[in-house]
């Protein structure tokens, strides 16, 4: 397995080190190449993502990313120039975000019940396309626009992926989240696509919810969800709500996939670079390790993925909640459990 | 006080009756005119909001709305043609949504702590402007767009209103919620406006959060928020999260205001028409009564607003959680408490 590693900023290198520890334990033929990208490189050289690096990344089986970001960088620079650029250039139209409440993990909800959902967020369209502008900036007549672009091609492929995932799960349930009553054009395309593709998956039951109502049900009744499919921006928000009710972004994993398999997928914890705790060895690497499991699964290494997931589940269920997390200790335990 | 009443569909008429009971008890000179608008009228006559009705509505001091909607009406018809049309025609640029956890109310959070926030959601811009379209519908080449329009004029006035509210509250704290790292054009306009208007309110401390992070903190640490200002779509979502953690939309009140005072405000519970429980006398009218308090406050009747709010607070803290809600009983109790 040829893996590109972008450790990134802040706690990124710390959690990635543990992710690699676990991955190396289950994949004997692991070859890694490190790429220095992120806030630090931009601040040093002004470079975000050189084309030559992008080309090299394409040659790998997968990419593992730690975290990108620094409060000293103006908003949008690293997002547009690096994180989103990677998603768009590598055609990562599926942004996969499971949200599961593990035994032993405290939810902020009083009665969470069992939670086990898989959010399939679109990754290359919607309001994320960067198609906006500004007129008469810094005057009282300024107008700023943001355009959400949605195509039949783009919606169909992510909806199809979501149905495929739903049909392989015991509950076989899919919820479309959108705002069809206000965003009527995009909403209609999404609804019709779910209906059409759904006809090929008669065994999957389908529900629809407006994003505002769904955000509420994620809190009052998260157990009702199985697979979710949604637009790029709605997905950004509801997956953070889902992460919150299942114990926080410290545990939230994600995969950015080109479902066609043409480009390598990129796997990353949902949390940021957390500069406040960087360098102290106290960041929880679990989200990175769970992202490694998504990576293995995407590469068809289901057995290895199951080992990593089982290691995390066991470790979380037996962790001493009183004891502060030590990054390397968690990684050691997970590597031993998964590789053993 | 000249009040226009749009009882609407489903449980709308039931909860509005109790709202009027309470309002009539504290406002001796109340004159009401009922307007038959909503799903039922549309299904009967095809009419949504005749211009003559809109003109008449303008002549009132305020509008009280119950709920609009019916599962038999295709998405978008009532929203675009009635609810949003009212907001746009009456220039309701401030959508006011308090979220307070009352004593005696069960939050779904295990440790909610005190929650008392005031969301100021923009009401006439953003992705709600209806500026979208579709190309090559029903073909594999379909493209659907939604345009978010944001103007200095529109953002400034709602930001100013939010600062005015923040400066009058004990904590004097304002949080801007947006997604400036992705929606860079609109985000920049919002950020710069908050900075500029904020310079006139040095006593207000200002924070910024991305909408995804905020949606998480609403769950893990809702007590940190005081006043919130945000865009139309983000406000739709985060106010439902806020409602969920403070006991559900059964208690969530809202006001649609033209802060300039030119047009009457419209006050409505956030919940929908709930056709499943309509006609049974079991809908909780509390959100409508809290909306009546917002109405009184907006019309400068602070003493009367305080009475209604105090009645609700007392009633909620002494309600028997085992006893099912009876709409008219709750209204009777609140009217007696507020009018006494
Ligand atoms: C950093 C940002 C561009 C990104 C997004 O909005 O997608 C992040 O919030 C995420 O969810 O991965
Ligand atoms: C019904 C719908 C148009 C409306 C909105 O999206 O604003 C509702 O969700 C609300 O929050 O008042």
Image (cartoon, coloured by chain):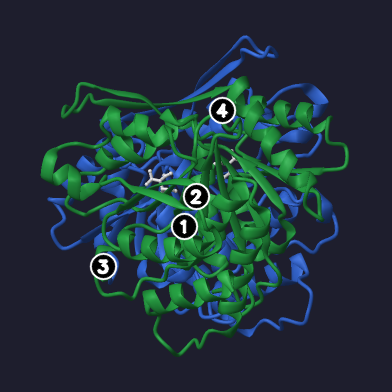
Chain colours: A green, B blue
Q: Is mark 1 within 8 Å of ligand 1?
A: no
Q: Residue at x 79, y 23 (%)?
A: B45
Q: What x and y, as percent, mark residue A131?
A: 38, 23
The residue to which callout 2 is attached is A237
Q: Disc 3 versus disc 4: distance between alpha carbons?
A: 58 Å
Q: Is mark 4 within 8 Å of ligand 2?
A: no
Viewer-nearest of discs 2 and 4: 2
- Residue at disc 1, secondary structure: helix
Ligand 2 shown in quarter: top right
On the image, which quarter does residue B258 sit in? top left
Seen as rendered, the residue at the extreme right is A202
Q: What x and y, as percent, mark residue B95?
A: 45, 46
The residue to which callout 3 is attached is A278
Q: Disc 2 versus disc 3: distance between alpha carbons?
A: 25 Å
Q: What x and y, as percent, mark residue A226?
A: 72, 54
Viewer-nearest of discs 2 and 3: 3
């Amino acid at each position: 397995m040829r893996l590109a590693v972008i450790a990134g900023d802040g706690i990124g290198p710390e959690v990635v080190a543990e992710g690699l520890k676990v991955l190396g334990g289950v994949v004997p033929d692991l070859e890694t190449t490190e790429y220095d990208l992120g806030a630090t490189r931009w601040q040093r050289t002004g470079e975000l993502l050189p084309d030559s690096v992008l080309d090299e990344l394409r040659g790998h089986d997968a990419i593992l990313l730690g975290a990108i970001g620094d409060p000293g960088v103006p908003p949008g620079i690293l997002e547009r120039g690096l994180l989103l650029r990677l998603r768009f250039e590598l055609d990562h139209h599926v942004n996969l975000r499971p949200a599961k409440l593990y035994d032993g993990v405290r939810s902020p909800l009083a009665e969470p019940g069992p939670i086990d959902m898989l959010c399939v967020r679109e990754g290359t369209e919607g309001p994320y396309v960067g198609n906006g502008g500004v007129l008469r900036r810094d005057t009282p007549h300024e107008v700023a626009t943001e355009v959400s672009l949605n195509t039949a091609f783009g919606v169909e492929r992510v909806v199809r992926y979501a149905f495929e995932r739903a049909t392989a799960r015991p509950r076989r349930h899919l919820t479309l989240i959108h705002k069809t009553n206000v965003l009527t054009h995009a909403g209609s395309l999404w609804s019709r696509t779910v209906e059409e593709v759904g006809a090929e998956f008669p065994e999957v039951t389908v529900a629809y919810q407006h994003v505002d109502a769904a955000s509420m049900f994620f809190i009052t009744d998260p157990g009702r969800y199985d697979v979710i499919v949604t637009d790029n921006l709605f997905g950004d928000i509801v997956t953070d709500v889902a992460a919150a009710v299942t114990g926080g972004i410290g545990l939230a994993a994600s995969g950015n996939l080109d479902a066609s398999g043409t480009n390598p997928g990129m796997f990353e914890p949902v949390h940021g670079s957390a500069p406040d705790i960087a360098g102290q060895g106290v960041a929880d690497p679990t989200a990175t390790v769970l992202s490694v499991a998504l990576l293995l699964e995407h590469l068809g290494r289901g057995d290895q993925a199951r080992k990593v997931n089982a290691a995390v589940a066991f470790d979380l269920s037996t962790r001493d909640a009183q004891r502060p997390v030590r990054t390397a200790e968690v990684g050691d335990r997970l590597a031993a459990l998964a590789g053993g």
